[in-house]
Amino acid sequence: MANWKVRPTASSYQFLYNNPFSQRVLPGWYRGVNLFALDLGEFSLPPEAVGAAPLYIPVTGFDPEGTPLPVEGQFYIFSRVPPNKGYTGFCQVTFVEVPPGYRPNSLRSQADVQAAGFHLIPSDLVLLLPIL
């Protein structure tokens, strides 16, 4: 999992942020509302030590090496944002295995993920994705 580098991009979405340091910005969803987060990378910390919140990433499966195959065009689905109690910016990835024919961004909230009943695959991957 540590070599997984595929991320959605914000290049086709306009938002107000001048990005003076050319940081990587990712689009996401929270309760059906579009948001953006800075991609500050992976961390080798126990999720419970940093208060990591669940982050849902829809995938179509995994390649032979175990690398997730993300749904092209799908934004990440955040479960906690500021000013929610306990928000830290750290996220623990849970992969959501979607069926063939899944339409990108059909899932836009943690409630959507839970209601869909798709197979959830927890991971040890912790990302730092502070919300803008």
Image (cartoon, helix red, strand yellow):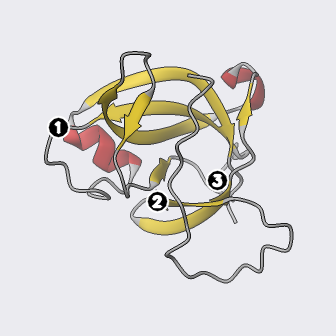
Q: Residues within 10 Å of mark 2 (few under 14, many from 20)?
A: many
How far separated are the C-alphas under marks 1 and 2?
A: 20 Å
* Residue under pointer 1: 99
Amino acid type at circle 3 is: Asn
Residue in the image at 47% along x and 50% along y: 76
Residue 59, horizontal then vertical, whole percent: 34, 37
Q: Nearer the viewer, mark 1 or mark 2?
A: 1
The kind of secondary structure element at disc 2 is strand
Residue in the image at 86% along x and 67% along y: 21
Q: Earlier in the sequence, mark 2 or mark 3?
A: 2
Q: Quadrant of residue 22?
A: bottom right
* Residue under pointer 2: 29
Amino acid type at circle 2 is: Trp
Residue 49, horizontal then vertical, whole percent: 76, 23
* Residue under pointer 3: 84
The kind of secondary structure element at disc 1 is loop
Amino acid type at circle 1 is: Pro
Locate the N terminus and report the quarter of the image it occupies.
top right
- The residue at the far left in this view is 101
Q: Is residue 84 left or right of residue 115?
A: right
